[in-house]
Image (tube, rainbow, N blue to C red):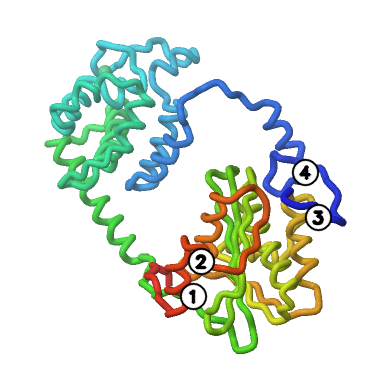
Amino acid sequence: MVVNISGKDDRLSWSETADGRFTVASAYKFLTRDYTPRPDMASLFQRVWRVTAPERVRVFLWLVVNKAIMTNQTRFRRHFGHTEICQVCKSGVESTLHVLRDCPAMEGIWRRIVQQRKQHAFFAMSLLEWLFENLSEDTELVNGSWPTLFSVSVWWAWKWRCGNVFGETRLWRDRVKFVKDYAKEVRSAMLASVQAGVVIREDRMISWLPPLAGWMKLNTNGASHGNPGEATAGGVIRDGDGKWCGWFALNIGRCTAQMAELWGLYYGLCFAWDKGIRQLEVEVDSATVVGFVQAGICDTHPLSFLVQLCHGFLSKDWEVRVTHVYREANRLADGLANYAFSLALGLHYFDCVPPDVLTVLREDECGVSQVRRIRV
Ligand SMILES: [Zn+2]
């Protein structure tokens, strides 16, 4: 803690949940956590669910990743079948990779789809590597992106295999052309639906705005190198002409980004109160912090003591409005927080402008604005 704050006792807070409340589930997770390195399945699943392909294709890929495809190999292992050999080529074990890639019929198709220089690696990878690499490749093809063509080909490899096993007699003239056309169709359908539900964004000019007549404005911000990491906070009070009425900066040491933001707000409020200000507009660029202040926070949350300290100040005999602004309107506080990294640990109050932020101060005074792309 930067300075001693009276009236607040240390309290236990459970670090395994976001709100500090103990749950048996989180304790179980904590105790059974396994730190041995393993493949990054989370990012593989992310790729599976993000690929541009029909839902059934994605679900199928998910089953493949979970090794839940019923091949002869699996059937044999579970004593459902009498052989693990592929009944199409009769030349190898029917594993998932065999069905989807290595069985001669499918291999021939892949050799016509995959670029020559990539073929060696393509056929050498293990199942999960193969899926991971091909679902992430960002090569744009004429027929849509590679992950789309790859995943619909995988899906059709399975469909064709099932058709074969269950005696489907349909004749396929050119399977390569078929999957390429299919991928193209999927791609254009997806693009059309994206365009239909497109999110409209527009550029808005954002600038710092002076407070209402008779009011003062406090801008605060926190900064951290990592979360948690070395953290600072800073804030500045200005009048209706944008004139500087003092600033503070805080070099906190190691804490979370949200804690830094809240320390900034807390010291900003102390600072303004001490200066005798009784009508104050406060601007913070963290919507979460504004939410904490406006809606409150549960008692077990690790930051509840700080939110309560802020509430303590807000309930004094003055008018304070805390609002969220975009960071383009909070550049001076941001500059001060960054400047605080060069200061000694602890709190610093100053009356003159540090040279590092002079330009931003002048720009705010003149109403210079910055472009921000906003979702409308
Ligand atoms: Zn085969």
Amino acid carrying mark 4 in the image: Ser
Residue contact between numbered discs 3 and 2, judged by CB atoms under 8 Å:
no
Residue in the image at 55% along x and 21% along y: 36
Find the residue positioned furthest to the bottom. 213
In the rendered structure, which disc, 1 or 2, sits on the residue that comes first in sequence? Answer: 1
Residue contact between numbered discs 1 and 2, judged by CB atoms under 8 Å:
yes
Secondary structure at badge 1 equals loop
Q: Position of residue 303 (x, y in %)?
A: 72, 52
Q: Position of residue 320 (x, y in %)?
A: 70, 77
Calculate the distance from the C-alpha at mark 1 to the C-alpha at mark 3: 32 Å
Calculate the distance from the C-alpha at mark 1 to the C-alpha at mark 2: 9 Å
Mark 1, residue position: 208
Can you say whether 100 is above or below 55 in the image? above
In the rendered structure, which disc, 1 or 3, sits on the residue that comes first in sequence? Answer: 3
Amino acid carrying mark 1 in the image: Trp
Amino acid carrying mark 2 in the image: Leu
Task: Tell me the quadrant of ligand 1.
Answer: top left
Mark 2, residue position: 332
Secondary structure at badge 3 equals loop
In the rendered structure, which disc, 3 or 2, sits on the residue that comes first in sequence? Answer: 3
Residue 13, label in figure: 4
Mark 1 or 3, closer to the camera: 3
In the rendered structure, which disc, 4 or 3, sits on the residue that comes first in sequence? Answer: 3
Crowding near pointer 3: few (<14 within 10 Å), some, many (20+)? few
Crowding near pointer 4: few (<14 within 10 Å), some, many (20+)? some
Mark 3, residue position: 5
Residue in the image at 32% along x and 37% along y: 135
Residue at mark 3: C-beta within 8 A of ligand 1? no
Calculate the distance from the C-alpha at mark 4 to the C-alpha at mark 3: 19 Å
